[in-house]
Amino acid sequence: MASLLPPVGKEIFRRFTRTSLAELQQYYEKEEREKLRRKEKNIEISEDDLPRPTSDLEAGKTLPFIYGDPPPELINTPLEELDSYYQSHKTFIVINKGNTINRFNADPACYLLSPFSVLRTTAIRILIHSYPFRGPI
């Protein structure tokens, strides 16, 4: 019987690499073929049977305590998705110092910048930086 609790420990936080992107692409293509097969055979799935995202792992929320703190070397770096719902959406997450979950698309940005390009990685780091900017006083 499968466990209802998420895996615990530092091993659940894995870097998002080119290998994991290739695996994600294969999973996405498999899901698309399955959808096409169901459509051809007129198989309908009810709304209740469709997978749903885990509410605790929404973008912008703090990482639940059950997952623990990610290792310091993995803060502000792309990580593999923790929520199985988003695997078919080709996404990766970045967790900042405040343990806030940020979710990004793994497709090339502007059809040019892969998730591993220096420009895109720098833009993600600037976007999720937790330093509060103050306006004029």
Image (cartoon, rainbow, N blue to C red):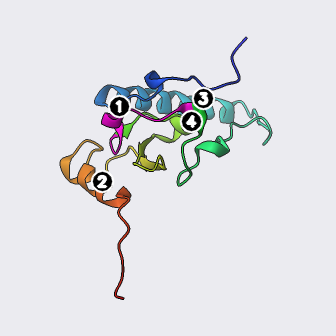
The answer for how far apart the CA atoms under marks 4 and 1 are is 15 Å
For the C terminus, the image quarter is: bottom left
Disc 1 residue crowd, few under 14, some 14–19, many 20+, Cα 10 Å: some
Q: Which residues are magenta?
A: 67-77
Residue that label 1 marks: 15
Mark 1 or mark 3, which is nearer the start of the sequence? 1
Which of 44 and 137 lies nearest the eye of the viewer?
137
Q: Earlier in the sequence, mark 2 or mark 4?
A: 4
Disc 2 crowd rating (10 Å Cα; few below 14, some 14-19, many 20+) is some
User: Which residue is drawn at the image coordinates 44% and 22% (left, top)?
Assistant: 11
Task: Identify the residue shown where x is 40% and y is 48%.
Answer: 97
Gap between marks 2 and 4 measured at Cα: 22 Å
Report the disc number at residue 83: 4
The amino acid sitting under disc 3 is Glu
Asked whether residue 84 appears in the rendered view, the answer is no
> Which mark is first along the chain, 3 or 2?
3
Q: Of the two numbered discs 4 and 1 on the same chain, state the one appearing first in sequence.
A: 1
x, y (%) of residue 51?
Answer: 68, 36
At label 2, the amino acid type is Arg
Task: Name the residue at 42% across, 45% down.
Answer: 95
Which amino acid, mark 1?
Arg
Tell me, for residue 117, which label it has, or none: none
Question: Is residue 135 depicted above or below 71 in this figure?
Answer: below
Mark toward the viewer: 2 or 4: 2
Q: Could you tell me which residue is drawn at 55 percent across and 32 percent down?
A: 67
* Secondary-structure class at tag 3: helix
Q: Which residue is mark 3?
A: 34
